[in-house]
Amino acid sequence: MISIKSQREIELMDKAGTVVALVHKHLRENLKPGMTTLDVDKMCEEVIRNNGCTPSFKGLYGFPGSVCTSVNEMLVHGIPDSKTVLKDGDIITVDVGACYKGYHGDSAWTFQVGKVTDEKVLDLLKVTEESLYEGLKQAKPGNRIGDISNAIQTYVEAHGYSLPIEYTGHGIGKQVHEDPYVPNVGKPHTGPVLKKGMCIAVEPMVFMGKPHCYTLDDGWGVKAIDHSMAAHYEHTITITDDGYRILTKED
């Protein structure tokens, strides 16, 4: 069932989302070669807790980390550990969730570690981020989820990249994952109608190569079968009277 959030609920989600944005700001300023993904996890958890929230992902479905740390060809759900050391030129997606007074904010971003010089990788990041905002252009009352999905798909595929259909955006609120699913592939004018007060996480996840993927033996991490590079960008939004408002950005 799709829930419509009250103004009070949206304000709580806005607080959670602002803390998520603070985590990403901290990452932009402090990520550096030589850090492990466990170092990244600890840094993120410290920012979350110091700002009055708890990590949404810690223990969610049994996930062991506070955030997901997906490096290079890892698409999603990378488990932070002390063995994976970030190198200059790597990319890392850090998917962050924060919970404030029972309500969640969720945003993923793909960061450069040091300086990325591979133009193909830089283009992947650019197109994936831009596809998020192409999808968000369709986020307004009266449109449908499929309008968002199709806008993302059209933009990504026009640039020669692919979208695995197994992983989608989602509704969000008291739970990290609520109805409706928000696919990154779809037909316009299909799916649930967007209404004021709906809160969703829109998150294109993009492979440089083919869209076929597999789950690692740890039961979490996901990679492309062809081991191509991957990027992932996500915002939590609420539908407004005439469009949308991003909840996971700094005030």
Image: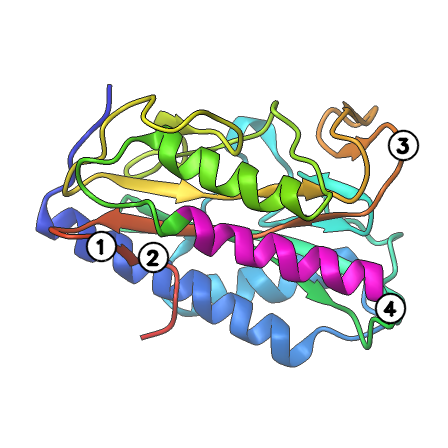
For the point 10% across and 51% down, the residue is 7
Q: Nearer the viewer, mark 3 or mark 4?
A: 3
Q: Which dot marks residue 241?
A: none
Q: Which residue is mark 4?
A: 89
Q: Are marks 1 and 4 in contact (CB under 8 Å)?
A: no
For the point 61% across and 23% down, the residue is 166
**Residue type indicated by callout 4:** Gly
C-alpha separation, residue under disc 2 versus residue under disc 3: 36 Å
Q: Which residue is mark 3?
A: 226
Q: Is residue 97 in view?
A: no
**Residue type indicated by callout 1:** Leu
Q: Looking at the rendering, in which quadrant would you find the C terminus? A: bottom left
C-alpha separation, residue under disc 2 versus residue under disc 4: 31 Å
Q: Which residue is mark 1?
A: 12
User: Considering only order in the chain, which callout, 4 or 3, is on the residue closer to the N terminus?
Assistant: 4
210 or 172: nearer the eye?
Answer: 210
